[in-house]
Image (cartoon, rainbow, N blue to C red):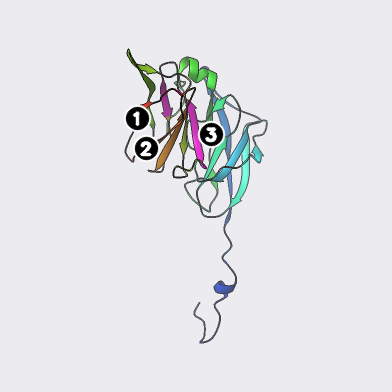
Amino acid sequence: MPTSAGAVDPSAIFPRIAPTFTISGTVYEVGLSGTQPLAGVPLDISVEYQSHPPQTTTDADGRYSATRSGTDPFTVKVEKPGYVQPCVARTLHEGTDNVLDIFVVRESVIRDAGLPAAFALPERTVSGVVFESTASGKKPVAGARLTADYSSGLGWGPAATTITDRAGRYVLCGLQRASIDFYVSSGFSGRLVPVESGVSWLDVELSRE
């Protein structure tokens, strides 16, 4: 609304209040025999370029709900030992209620049998093989950990994590943003790998420490 000459615009005195909204959904475990809700899962719900200790835990039916404020995108990350979350769960409509279901897999399942066939892979996906170079050629690295990070290489915004299977293969999914970095580590030297827009297959070489 226009103000008269000499009048003070109220917005200059009272800052705009950030909208409050709810992020909710269900955490599911995907196994070789199917999918089921997972109770007692700690969740880190933070703006996508940050990470904080979990303050929300799924209930007996695997459901969670949290209230947040602001206009930046948020990510929901599972923090349960022995499990990985291969797909990013990221709010798409900032400042409004979002429903984000999350799918996790036991590390032991991926390590021994790969990602279960029942695991849905929302776009964008990036997959490949983690390997080391030896005198006899390329050798796959099993059990390497890959983390998709949304903090421009600072390591503050992990959004999804997986490990490689026995053949060194990995898949990360739900990577909505064009700018992504992968942190890759195992018993080798860790490595930061920038992932360019449009890339869907990326092999990663690791070197022994």
Which mark identifies residue 195? 2
| Magenta residues (range) | 156-171
Q: Are marks 2 and 1 in contact (CB under 8 Å)?
A: yes
Residue 102 is tagged as: 3
Q: Which mark is residue 159?
A: none
**Is 44 located above or below residue 68 in the figure?**
above
Out of 115 and 52, give the one closest to the viewer.
Answer: 52
- Front residue of 174/54: it is 54
Locate residue 12: give its quadrant: bottom right
Q: Position of residue 70 (x, y in %)?
A: 55, 55
164 falls in the magenta region: yes
Give the amino acid at mark 2.
Val
**CA gap, disc 2 to disc 1?**
8 Å
Which amino acid is tagged 1?
Leu
Horizontal side of 127 relative to 156 (left or right) equals left
Mark 2 falls on what kind of element? strand
Q: Residue at x 57, y 57 (%)?
A: 19
> How packed is label 3: few (under 14 Cα within 10 Å), some, or many (20 or more)?
many
Q: Nearer the viewer, mark 1 or mark 3?
A: 1
As helix, strand or loop, the secondary structure at mark 1 comes to loop
Residue bearing the label numbered 1: 202
Residue type of the residue flagged with mark 3 = Ile
